[in-house]
Image (spheres, helix red, strand yellow):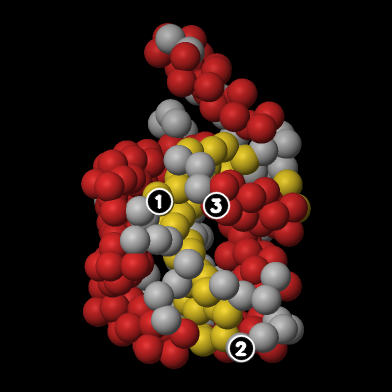
Amino acid sequence: MKVFITGASSGIGAALAAHYAARGARLGLVARRRDVLAEIARGLPGEHALYAADVADAQAMAGAAHDFMQRFGVPDIVIANAGVSVGTLTEHPEDVAVFERVMRTNVVGLAATFQPFIAPMRAARRGRLAGISSVAGMRGIPGAGAYSASKAAAITYLEALRIELRPSGVRVVTVCPGYVATPMTAVNKYRMPFILPADVAARRIARVIDAGRRYAVVPWQMALVARAMKLLPNAVYDRLFKRAGRKPRGLKL
């Protein structure tokens, strides 16, 4: 098995790398921090390729993809997991640049990750492209407008891509995790219901990808929460979430 994973230096990405390496997969691991990536790779069994790249840099991602395919062949699975999360408030002028950064990583990064693999996968008439979105993309989360918008965009982008590739034999999988214990959520000061350890989340996400499911929320309890959130009338949603805990602003991205 050959698996290409972005955002592999921490959190869900590192846990997915450990999960697939334990199954004997050859991995392509992408992250901005090469030193941290190398440290994680040293603890994994098997042969793997490491790429220090920003997923929003299409040229860098194309180079990583082509190198991986030259070394190992067309991957069976590509997991676009890289993402950033930070509190934003539109009233602050400095947050406009933060919005742009979040959207580039969380949305443009999906397309830049998948693009180099689509033609080879089409030719092979197989493969899975898995995008990690979030339950936060179901409704607008106050104080996290950029993150919510990016994850909503990710969900609709992945849906469009799934339909585009349906005749080709390439499956597109959308996974929306709830809360997962990672550095991204460690800064949150509010209650996080049904939070999963990263290794548990990785196993459940991998099952969804292996099954080739079109769309899944992990864990199942958050699937019920997400469904309820989508059904709430706007007035009710506004009242419930106006005092919701907020992600800190000014985090390093």
- As drawn, 135 above or below 243: below
Give residue 7's position: percent from left, percent from top: 51, 68
Q: Secondary structure at mark 3?
A: helix
Q: Quick check: 73 left or right of 22?
A: left
Q: Is residue 143 visible?
A: no
- Characterize the local packing of mark 1: few (<14), some (14-19) or many (20 or more) Cα atoms within 10 angstroms: many
Q: Secondary structure at mark 1?
A: strand
Disc 3 marks which residue? 209
Q: Residue at x 47, y 14 (%)?
A: 231
Q: Is residue 50 visible?
A: yes
Labels 1 & 3 near each other (Cβ < 8 A): no
Q: Residue at x 40, y 51 (%)?
A: 171
Numbered tag placed on residue 171 in the rendering: 1
Could you give the CA–CA distance between mark 1 and mark 3, rounded to whole angstroms? Answer: 9 Å
Compare marks 3 and 2 and give the one earlier in the sequence: 2
Disc 2 marks which residue? 47
Q: Quadrant of the N terminus?
A: bottom right
The front one of 14 and 92 is 14
Give residue 84's position: percent from left, percent from top: 46, 58
Could you give the CA–CA distance between mark 1 and mark 2, rounded to whole angstroms? Answer: 26 Å
Give residue 155's position: percent from left, percent from top: 38, 41
- As drawn, 63 above or below 134: below
Numbered tag placed on residue 246 in the rendering: none
- As drawn, 26 above or below 84: below
The amino acid type of the residue labelled 3 equals Ile
The amino acid type of the residue labelled 1 equals Arg
